[in-house]
Image: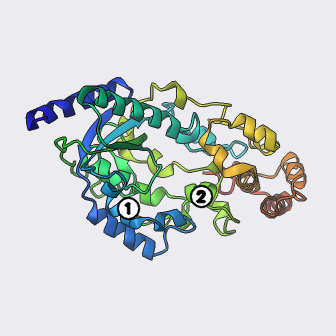
Amino acid sequence: MVAADFSALALQVKDWGRALGFQQVGVSTLAVDTDADQLDAWLAAGFHGEMDYMARNTDLRRHPERLVPGAIRAICVRMDYRPMAEYPDHVLNQAELGYVARYALGRDYHKVLRKRLEQLARRIADAVGPHGYRVFTDSAPVLEKALARQAGLGWIGKHTNLLDRQAGSWFFLGEILTDLPLPADQPLAAHCGSCRACIDICPTQAIVAPYRLDARLCISYLTIEHKGAIPEALRPLMGNRIYGCDDCQLVCPWNRYARLSAEADFAPRHALDAPRLLDLFAWDERAFETHLAGSPIRRIGHARWLRNVAVALGNASFSPVIASALESRVDHPDALVREHAGWALARQRARATTPLPANQTEGCG
């Protein structure tokens, strides 16, 4: 194909992508040295915590073309996932409820995006014949935010999420690395300005500087990636956030423009948009597996789920019912569950003798 044909193909690829449900499609070169340098500095500071996979294959992150021999471009896509219009303070401010990050309310996004990306790649192959490619959606050592920024899908905000002026940050990213020489799009200018709302709102002050996140303090890391005991000093700050945290996105001015997702797969399942903590804490392992089948939450396992919910119950106002539920788990076979249930029970008992002022709940948003 001649250069003009590849320009036309790039436009077609964007049309095909939108027809498949992607809200935006762009093309990036694979030059990510500056971002790779920033990653190296982040790793050297130890900000990745227990995420050892971030420290592996750093050479592949710097040289994505080594993942797909002959690759010279990344076709980057955005799929919006905002499941509801209302601000979820009705959940964050009710200690008896559990807050689940909005991205995890529905079906596992990895499966949704991967299927659509494969369809897009096959559509390209139908048009141009066999070509070297591989699809990615948070599934390999790829600096996807850097590639998406270069493809014109947004800029990286101070909270380290990708931002777009029309879409905010409520979206997933995916990529197709390809050997097709498609014309690359231009990056967007950053538009955070002097705003520091995301930095100031973070419950644990995990955004230690603009564009610099210490994952070890981040509630998303603590509730999802961290496998061991949650540091005691951070537990009260977690409030009722049991899987992930959206505070930095909820407060971002650009998310006023984010549109609701039309994807049925991202709609809330099993009432996880405002679940009762006591109901979740009562799940045995079978119930956990059944209720969360097809959900990204399932991968943390039942013990870490109970760990997270126990912390939220420990942060709630005193209730004999909560105390009783926690007592039922203090002899749990898993030491992680026992330790967090015991901590939460001790807080409940202390609160029973020294109650908080009326209408005040410690650490619940």
Sequence-wise, the earlier of marks 1 and 2 is: 1
| Location of mark 2 (residue) | 225
Image colouring = rainbow
As drawn, the residue found furthest toward the bottom would be 44
Observer-nearest of 57 and 87: 57
Local secondary structure at mark 2: helix
Q: What is the x, y in percent for residue 260? A: 44, 29
Residue 249's disc is none
Q: Quadrant of residue 142?
A: bottom left
Q: What is the x, y in percent for residue 101? A: 56, 44
* Residue 82 visible here: no
Q: What is the x, y in percent for residue 3? A: 9, 38
* Residue drawn 54% across the image and 61% down it: 218
* Residue drawn 25% across the image and 26% down it: 127
Observer-nearest of 228 and 210: 228
Q: Residues within 10 Å of mark 2 (few under 14, many from 20)?
A: some
Q: Amino acid at mark 1?
A: Leu
Is 25 on the left-hand or right-hand side of 352? left
* Residue drawn 44% across the image and 71% down it: 43
Observer-nearest of 256 and 185: 185
Count of numbered badges drawn on the protein: 2
Badge nearest the viewer, 1 or 2: 1
| Location of mark 1 (residue) | 60
Local secondary structure at mark 1: helix
Is 314 on the left-hand or right-hand side of 260? right
* Residue drawn 39% across the image and 27% down it: 21
* Residue 245 visible here: yes
Q: Quadrant of residue 61?
A: bottom left
Q: What is the x, y in percent for residue 139? A: 47, 49
